[in-house]
Amino acid sequence: MLKKISLTFFSKLTNAVLGFLNAILITQFLGAEGKGITTLLVTNLSLCLLFCQVIGGNSMVYLSSRLPTSVLLVASYLWTIVVSVLLTAILYFIGMCPSQYFIELIVISILFSLFHAHLFILLGNENTILFNLLSPLPQLLQVGAAVILFILLQIHNINTYIFNLYFIFAAGYLISLIFILPKLSGFKMPDKETFRTLWKYGSKAQTSNILFFFNSRLFFYLLGYYFIKSEVGIYSVGIMIIEAVLLIGNSFSLMLYSKISNTVSATEQLSLTKKYVLISFIFTAFALAVIALIPADAYAILFGQDFYSIKKIALYLFPGTLLLSTYYVTSSYFSGTGKYQYNNYAVGLGLGISVVGGLLYIPSGDLLAAASVTSAAFSAIALFSLYRFYKEVKIIG
């Protein structure tokens, strides 16, 4: 299991490093405003992906051994197309998707979501190595495109960069499809029962993921609404640093979920969870200590002078980040034992704090207000989950 966790962590770390490289290229050549525009686009893309994964996400891992690949694939394709169009239209009508990027968001979200559906089918077939090798592909292609556009061709235009995302995500989709085609045997349309089964497993798993998304991304929308796009760009880089640290706990999540799901002994499930809660907390504390030692000037050199305040933003996020490192482990326990509701309650509590805090402090506050509220929300999520896990230990252990 440690080998699988290490492989997953390395894949996620590679993805994070590529994300940093892409962010550096965008901030250096397009500035804070360019970073803000791309952040809002990627945030909308991530939101579409989350809803598409209600059918084309984790549930496909569980059902890959129980249903034909062609049935799962057709179901995810149909669901993805419908959800991408409807959700983009909703984002457009509420003013969260600029009209000039309406078509781009639909097409890219379809390609990106189907790319992930292919990955989950591979994971469901226990092809962990291929899953982890392909996962960083979109980020790698984005870095390559940014180098070609910004450095080689000297094109520093945000619209040109976004247009090139068509080719980036199309390439990722086609490459992943190549590995899926050999697994197809015939063609069969999914019936109502298949959709019902996919919805049953997918909706339970995705509810907490969707709620958690808004905990960390709600302020992108609020800052974009109340302030200029550059504020979104600056704050998003601070969040990116914190999310890189959270990869430690996140890497335990998927593999621990699989292990707990296949462990019969309740005592062993608790023991395993307690062990990794401590490991995740210690490793995260060490990573945060390293970040605290990096001077603010280093961020200004990497991302540009507009980003000098990033370190202070990150420091305000530290308390919630350290506590949240434990949530990834306890949430895997609750998912693995079928008690999804506790994850939903925890993340729902955090979202409530984010909404109230955001509406109270963001309009008259600043980026540090956003970081403080986010840290409080993260802390509430982790503490509630730890409390529920403690209750489990008292009952079972």
Image: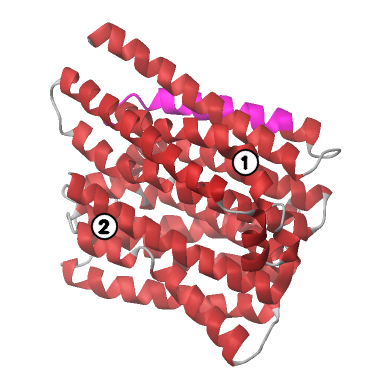
Which-is-in-front pick, marks 1 and 2? 1
Place of residue 83 in the rendered image (x, y in percent of width and height, measured from the top left): 51, 54
Please report contact status of discs 1 and 2: CB closer than 8 Å, yes or no. Answer: no
Mark 1 neighbour class, 10 Å CA radius: few under 14, some 14 to 19, many 20 or more: some
Q: Residue placed farthest to the bottom in the image? A: 153
- On screen, 325 above or below 111? above
User: Does the magenta stretch mainly form a helix, a strand or a loop?
Assistant: helix
Mark 2 neighbour class, 10 Å CA radius: few under 14, some 14 to 19, many 20 or more: many
Residue at mark 1 to residue at mark 2: CA–CA distance: 39 Å
Q: Earlier in the sequence, mark 1 or mark 2?
A: 2
Amino acid, disc 2: Ile
Amino acid, disc 1: Leu
Pointer 2 residue = 121
Choose between 330 and 293: the one closer to the eye: 293
Residue at position x 76%, y 54% in the image: 231
Choose between 180 and 154: the one closer to the eye: 154
Residue 118 relative to residue 97: left or right: left
Question: Which element type, helix, strand or loop, lies under badge 2?
Answer: helix
- On screen, 114 above or below 392? below
Residue 342 relative to residue 146: left or right: left
Question: Which element type, helix, strand or loop, lies under badge 1?
Answer: helix
Pointer 1 residue = 315
- On screen, 57 above or below 340? below
Q: Is residue 181 magenta?
A: no
Q: Quadrant of the N terminus?
A: top left
Choose between 226 and 287: the one closer to the eye: 287
The magenta segment is 336-357
Q: Is residue 283 visible?
A: yes
Place of residue 52 in the rendered image (x, y in percent of width and height, measured from the top left): 46, 52
Place of residue 110 in the rendered image (x, y in percent of width and height, measured from the top left): 48, 64
Residue at position x 54%, y 27% in the image: 379
- Image quadrant assignment for residue 33: bottom right
